[in-house]
Amino acid sequence: MIQSTASCLCSRVKITANNINPQFSVCHCETCRTWAGGPFFGLQCGTDVVIEGSDKVKEYDSSSWATRGFCSECGTHLFYKFKTTGEYNMPVGLFKNLPDLTMDMQYFSDQRPDYYCFTNQSKHLSQAEIMAYFASIT
């Protein structure tokens, strides 16, 4: 696990994540692609996350199992947080120079548009598989 700090574009929100898993996932679902403008590259950061400037964080209830957070000043996407566990997934791009990152899994791979494809070797979960997974944790 890795510890690192990050901030939004305007630096009003600062984040310290103490347990970043260097094996990140990529989500191809329509919601993530709409939110991120492309697939969401997410680092699993667990619950040991400190957010300074939380008064500038706006959360959006994006599904029955998670919320998405962004800076209300500059709009930077900050996190995807599971409601039941409080675990954070954060965009890879928030953190600078993280060592040894590896794409481990791709979610909603059956919803990936034809205009991009990653060559990395990783696990793929279809919509049905990921929905069954989320149903088991909510």
Image (cartoon, rainbow, N blue to C red):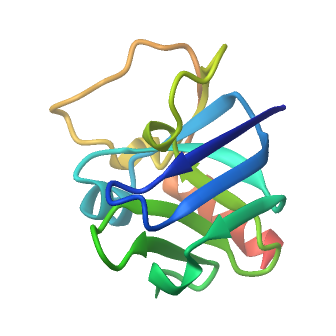
- In the picture, measured across the screen, residue 19 lies left or right of residue 56, that is right
Q: Quadrant of the N terminus?
A: top right
| Quarter location, residue 58 | bottom left
Report the residue that reaches farthest toward the left.
115
Q: In percent of the image, x 25 and y 63: which residue is there?
A: 34
Q: In percent of the image, x 56 and y 52: which residue is there?
A: 90
- Is the residue 83 above or below the residue 90 in the image? below
Q: In percent of the image, x 23 and y 42: which residue is there?
A: 113
Counting every numbered tag in the picture gives 0
Q: Quadrant of the C terminus?
A: bottom right
The percent coordinates of residue 128 (x first, y second) are: 56, 59
Of 65 and 46, which appears nearest the observer?
46
Of 7 and 70, which appears nearest the observer?
7
| Quarter location, residue 39 | top left
Q: In percent of the image, x 48 and y 73: which residue is there?
A: 69
- Is the residue 95 above or below the residue 18 in the image? above
The percent coordinates of residue 40 (x first, y second) are: 41, 47
- In the picture, measured across the screen, residue 46 lies left or right of residue 44, that is right
Of 80 and 5, which appears nearest the observer?
5
Q: Is residue 58 in sight in this rendering?
A: no
Q: Is residue 130 in sight in this rendering?
A: yes
The percent coordinates of residue 74 (x first, y second) are: 27, 67
